[in-house]
Amino acid sequence: MRIRNQFLLTLLGACLVILLVTSVLMQFSFQRSLDQYLSQRQHALLTELSSEFSEYYDHYGSFDGITLRTLIWGAEGPSQPHIPPDLVLLNSARAPIFGPPIPTGELTLRVIKVSGETVGWLGLPNSPEARADIEHRFARKQRNLLLSIASATLCLAFIGAWWLSRKLVKPIEAVATFSRTLRDGDFKQRLSGSFLRTQKSDELKQLSSSMNSLAHSLEQSHSSRQRWLADLSHELRTPVTVMRAELEAMQDGVRPLDQHQINAVLSETLHLTKLLDDLHDLSLADVGALRYRMEPIDFGDIVRVSCASYEPLFSAKQQQLICHIPSAPLIQNGDAVRLRQLLDNLLSNALKYTDNGTNVDVSLEQHAGKITLSIKDDSPGVSDEQLAHLFDHLYRVENSRNRHTGGAGLGLAICQRIVEAHQGTIKAHHNNVGETHGLAIEIHFTRGGKS
């Protein structure tokens, strides 16, 4: 059953239950209050009529002609007292004067006095049969009134429920249609702005906005996956193509089979192996399967050893590697091998992507229970657009860079996974010092890391 029909039937069912409960409560209270009401009504009516009959007797000295007088009262309109058809008038000896022949024992009597003397009695029937007849007539009127009210209420409830169900279910149906569009792989569609403007700031609008955000995320993920597959196939094809060309050239005798050619093929093999190892590590990190051996380590000592191993490489490019490492131990719970891999990737990038004769500054400090590592280099730096993609898979600042120099663009992505596994954060920003425009990478670890 469609949700609109369910909603409509639910509202109508609730309205019907309320009407049934109301009718049951009315029926229950009707039996208890009707007797009290009839008794009070009889006493009030008899009190009013006894005064009228007393004045008549005082004026004429008897009840002669009282029957005609009661007819005149009934014809004169609502301003005169109402004479019930079952009203009984008795004389002082309780002998009937007019009215239906009802035994005195079945009457509720009210005395008529003139100057303190009893001159007669007025009575109304109070037998169970009379009350049952009155109850039946009253109950029939109440039942007819209740049925009329219930019919009108159900009609109004149906119209209101139909309008409300349409108003509430229509955006849900739109979101359901939109979700089927996403299921079919069309991630470019969005819930239109006019649809969102018609919704108030409630859960439905929040749901619609969330669905648009989901579509945007799915579109980006789909585009990233396609770009990832394209880049991956390109990165793998290049060294394989080079190796094949070299081997075919040696096989055809175009190139000699000597130590130099073997070293060239081996270099491509090593490059391909490094790429596959990085891809393997990155895939394991993405699914949380990259293993870490967490233990208390001196993070300052790891940074110090990495800097010492890279100093000759920087010196060879006339670059100066400046390290600011505190002498006091900085105990961090982490994996020494992975943290060394992190530093190797960062220092290797700084070595490859900075100009000769520039400086690379490495600083390590502790403040407010956090360990901060920053690596800042000089020109050429990166643009704002490139800065936003530095940690993407297979992203290289220069797409035309020679792969032997620039790498495959996986180093920073792996660095980000290692930092996150140690409950840290890594970010990159511009390093603008004087006339230089370099790159700064900062890593923040909460002391203690991941246990």
Image: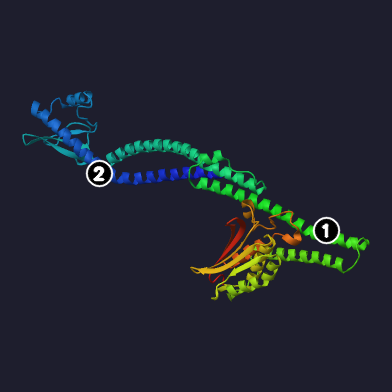
Is 300 on the left or on the right of 83, as rendered?
Answer: right
- Pinpoint residue 172: horizontal percent, then vertical percent: 55, 44
Looking at the picture, does residue 433 appear above or below residue 86? below
Answer few, some or many: residues within 10 Å of disc 2's Cα (few below 14, many 20 plus, some between 14 and 19). Answer: few
Residue at mark 2 to residue at mark 1: CA–CA distance: 106 Å
Does dot 1 land on a helix, a strand or a loop?
A: helix
Nearest the eye: 196 or 397: 397
The amino acid type of the residue labelled 2 equals: Gln
- Image quarter where the N terminus lies is top right
- 270 displayed left or right of 86: right
Check residue 241 in the rendering and tell me which mark sits there, or answer none. 1
Which residue is the site of mark 2?
36
Residue occupying the point 68% across, 64% down: 351
Q: Earlier in the sequence, mark 2 or mark 1?
A: 2
Which of the two discs, 2 and 1, sits closer to the camera?
1
Instruction: Name the residue: 64% across, 74% down.
Output: 305
